[in-house]
Image (tube, coloured by chain):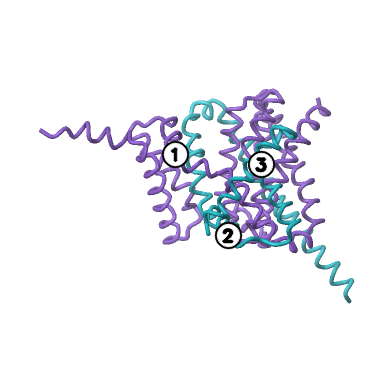
Chain colours: A cyan, B purple
């Protein structure tokens, strides 16, 4: 049942919102909900098929849901043009550099760990 | 005499027009990507371009479009929560790579924020603009809060976050290929850490493991930005 799984996800988002307001106002409700559901799954030790089905369905359409908020860039064309060089220089350059750096670092660390484990098993 | 103009206006300003526009643009973009498999045909960007063109052509203000699409966007919250599932399914892999993940998060997160400060100083950006740009790799609600606390502009922070996400998802796969980062866990980590939700969507497209690591990196980076960035700024100034 897809609806059953969707209901769980909605309930956890609402729980997350409550916890966010009560305890961690610097974190948004959905992120707290993510952490809560993850902890719930860890404690329970198994994944309900219906939740998995609902999650897969929603995640498949994540790019679709992101389109309307992303169009907001249009409403700020003026501000972006005003700060054009800061945007290009700081945002684009730092984004490209940190993207490559993070990916490279993670891959190196994974390879290093794999090598060490191999040495250990030898 | 048929009133074509009235009919046209009724269709264009019907709430479902905006929803239909999003759906049609998204499917056309996905179809185009499946046909061409070109990286610059990144479906998300093509869909955005199509929607913006139609909105400008039909003179629909962004506010109207956004409000009429609430039925789609309200699911963003539960979908964020749903990211717990790929995380849980890849638990053994995440446990196995726990040390690389934590090291990449702390070093990568620090470098990402430091780069903004260094480049901002080089380009001579104002303090307020710098504080608006600093949290750009976190999801927008976190970035808006942090920017506001640091003396930046919340609305503009949301725009920078969006731009970062869209550009990251567009350039990310290409850049990572160029620098021979092929490990799905590493690719996911890079996309989620620097380009939050849009990057995660792109990573999910590449595969489940890649998506799981992106989802995790996104949440961890969000927490790190919310907690560590204000502290770092306070220490620096």
* Image side of residue A82 versus residue B222, left or right: left
- Residue furthest out toward the bottom: A122
Residue B8 sits in quarter? top left
Viewer-nearest residue: B59 or B40: B59
What is the chain letter for disc 2?
Answer: A
**Disc 3 vs disc 1: which is toward the camera?**
3
Query: Would you call the spot at circle 1 few (<14 residues within 10 Å), some (14-19), or many (20 or more)?
Result: many
Rendered position, A104 above or below B47: below
Query: In this rendering, do the residues under marks 3 and 1 share a single chain?
Result: no
Residue B116 in percent (x, y) is at: 70, 35
Residue B171 in percent (x, y) is at: 57, 49
Q: Which residue is drawn at 72% across and 41% down?
A: B112
Dot 3: element = helix
Query: Would you call the spot at circle 2 few (<14 residues within 10 Å), some (14-19), or many (20 or more)?
Result: some
Dot 1: element = loop
Rendered position, B55 above or below B93: above
Alpha carbons under labels 1 and 2: distance apart: 26 Å
**Mark 3–mark 1 CB contact (< 8 Å):** no
- Determine which of the numbered discs, if any, sits on residue A15 in the image: 3
Q: Which residue is drawn at 51% across and 39% down?
A: A70
Residue underneath mark 1: B69
Residue underneath mark 2: A50
Rendered position, B14 above or below B104: above
- Determine which of the numbered discs, if any, sits on residue B216 in the image: none
Q: In which quarter of the image is the N terminus of chain B?
A: top left
Alpha carbons under labels 3 and 1: distance apart: 24 Å
What is the chain letter for disc 3?
Answer: A
Dot 2: element = helix
What is the chain letter for disc 1?
Answer: B
């Amino acid at each position: 049942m897809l609806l059953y799984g969707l209901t769980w996800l909605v309930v956890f988002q609402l729980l997350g919102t409550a916890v966010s307001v009560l305890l961690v106002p610097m974190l948004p409700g959905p992120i707290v909900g993510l952490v809560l559901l993850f902890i719930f799954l860890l404690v329970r030790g198994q994944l309900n098929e219906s939740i998995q089905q609902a999650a897969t369905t929603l995640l498949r359409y994540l790019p679709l849901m992101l389109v309307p908020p992303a169009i907001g860039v249009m409403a700020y064309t003026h501000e972006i043009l005003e700060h054009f060089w800061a945007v290009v220089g700081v945002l684009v350059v730092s984004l490209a550099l940190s993207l490559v750096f993070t990916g490279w670092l993670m891959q190196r660390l994974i390879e290093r760990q794999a090598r060490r484990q191999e040495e250990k098993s030898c | 005499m048929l009133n074509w103009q009235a009919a046209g206006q009724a269709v264009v300003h019907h709430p479902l027009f905006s929803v239909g526009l999003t759906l049609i643009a998204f499917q056309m973009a996905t179809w185009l990507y499946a046909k061409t498999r070109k990286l610059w045909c990144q479906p998300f960007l093509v869909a955005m371009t199509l929607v913006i063109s139609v909105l400008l052509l039909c003179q629909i203000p962004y506010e109207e479009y956004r409000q009429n699409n609430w039925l789609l966007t309200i699911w963003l919250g539960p979908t964020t929560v749903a990211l717990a599932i790929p995380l849980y399914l890849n638990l053994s892999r995440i446990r196995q790579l726990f040390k690389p993940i934590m090291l990449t998060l702390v070093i990568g997160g620090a470098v990402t924020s430091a780069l903004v400060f260094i480049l901002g100083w080089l380009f001579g950006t104002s303090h307020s603009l710098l504080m608006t740009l600093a949290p750009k790799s976190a999801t927008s609600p976190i970035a808006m809060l942090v920017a506001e606390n640091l003396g930046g502009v919340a609305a503009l922070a949301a725009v920078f976050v969006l731009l970062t996400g869209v550009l990251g998802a567009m350039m990310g796969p290409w850049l990572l290929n160029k620098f021979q980062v092929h490990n799905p866990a590493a690719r996911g980590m890079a996309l989620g850490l620097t380009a939050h939700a849009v990057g995660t969507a792109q990573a999910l497209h590449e595969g489940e493991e890649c998506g799981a690591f992106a989802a995790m990196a996104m949440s961890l980076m969000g927490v790190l930005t919310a907690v560590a960035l204000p502290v770092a700024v306070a220490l620096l100034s």
